[in-house]
Image: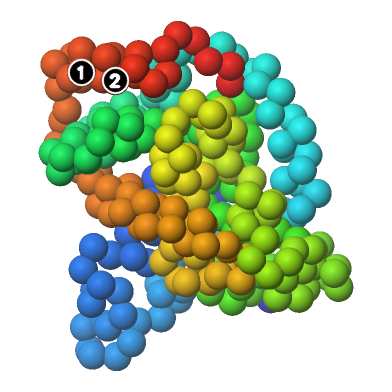
């Protein structure tokens, strides 16, 4: 099916990412009953209500996210030769994504990250959990390295096997070259039952990139939160269980515990960054001191 071109490509990078994040809240509202029933009592057609620019985002994402593309991006970025930055420098770098055309609505990225981390802190979670809230979206600096938005954000999914029909806008995968590869079109594809997600190639984006930057530096539950927080087909829709092993299922309890903080903590309420900075400087120095290679 052909869709008219939208204004997605002309949107600022920040605005495009914000559009995807707003769309997630419509798909997975904090109160579950809001997602399924319309004002007239009928079931909502989520995809029919989606903004054109978000539809275009998913059309591009589902068309171009192939197994070969993910392998190419890993080869490009897992050399970690883009920049050398501390965590705080990375957060400040991410602030360049702010949409200057509407400064009264869009808060700096650092304030949104702190909102997530502070909500986790208020609920008494471990220090590494708080740090994960602070840094979980730092992989979005890929946009500042020149990547298209569809290659940075969006729901993630396994490659090299059949695309689940629970992936939002599943119909757009008809334009994905992998959909025509017989070996990739079965339930397991290239993989074996219960092989474990670490043996599965995921679609490329900020989650996978940051996971590799942080690998061996943080507790394993934190790494699962970072790597799979956008894997909505699994942790919200229950798909791809056949690829998981028992350890994945255990770790996904942490991913699900993190998800509400990821989705529901952003607000337009300002954060006093300077008053919070000493606590987070100490937290960063505990786990991720000095400059990291990005």
Looking at the image, the residue that sits furthest to the front is 246
Point 58% across, 41% down: residue: 208
Tell me residue 143's x, y (percent).
56, 32
Between the residue at mark 1 and the residue at mark 2, the CA separation in whole angstroms equals 6 Å
47 or 25, which lies in front?
A: 25
Q: Secondary structure at mark 1?
A: helix
Residue receiving disc 2: 283
Q: Which of the image's four quarters has the N terminus?
A: bottom right
Would residue 127 be visible to someone looking at this image? yes
Residue receiving disc 1: 279
Tell me residue 257's x, y (percent).
31, 54
218 or 185, which lies in front?
A: 218
In the image: residue 37, left or right of residue 193: left
Crowding around mark 2 (Cα neighbors within 10 Å: few <14, some 14 to 19, many 20+) is: some
Point 56% across, 11% down: residue: 84
Q: Which of the image's four quarters has the C terminus?
A: top right
Tell me residue 12's x, y (percent).
48, 37
């Amino acid at each position: 099916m052909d869709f008219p071109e939208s204004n997605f490509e002309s949107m600022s990078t920040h605005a495009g990412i914000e559009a995807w994040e707003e769309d997630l809240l419509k798909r997975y509202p904090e109160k579950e009953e809001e997602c399924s029933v319309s004002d007239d009592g009928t079931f909502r057609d989520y995809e029919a209500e989606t903004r054109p620019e978000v539809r275009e985002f998913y059309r591009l994402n589902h068309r171009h996210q192939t197994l070969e593309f993910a392998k190419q991006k890993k080869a490009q970025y897992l050399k970690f030769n883009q920049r050398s930055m501390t965590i705080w420098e990375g957060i400040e770098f991410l602030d360049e994504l702010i949409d200057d055309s509407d400064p009264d609505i869009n808060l700096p990225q650092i304030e949104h990250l702190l909102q997530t981390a502070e909500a986790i802190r208020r609920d008494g979670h471990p220090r590494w959990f708080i740090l994960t809230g602070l840094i979980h979206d730092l992989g979005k600096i890929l946009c500042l390295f020149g990547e298209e938005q569809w290659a940075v954000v969006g729901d993630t999914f396994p490659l090299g096997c059949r695309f689940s029909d629970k992936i939002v806008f599943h119909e757009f995968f008809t334009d994905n070259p992998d959909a025509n590869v017989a070996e990739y079109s079965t339930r397991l594809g290239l993989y074996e039952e219960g092989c474990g997600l670490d043996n599965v190639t995921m679609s490329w984006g900020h989650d996978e990139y940051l996971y590799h930057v942080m690998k061996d530096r943080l507790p394993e539950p934190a790494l699962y939160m970072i790597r799979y927080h956008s894997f909505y087909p699994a942790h919200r829709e229950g798909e791809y269980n056949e690829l998981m092993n028992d350890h994945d299922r255990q770790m996904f309890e942490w991913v699900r515990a993190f998800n509400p903080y990821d989705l529901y903590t952003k607000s337009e309420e300002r954060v006093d960054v300077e008053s919070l900075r000493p606590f987070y400087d100490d937290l960063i120095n505990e786990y991720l001191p000095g400059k990291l290679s990005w």
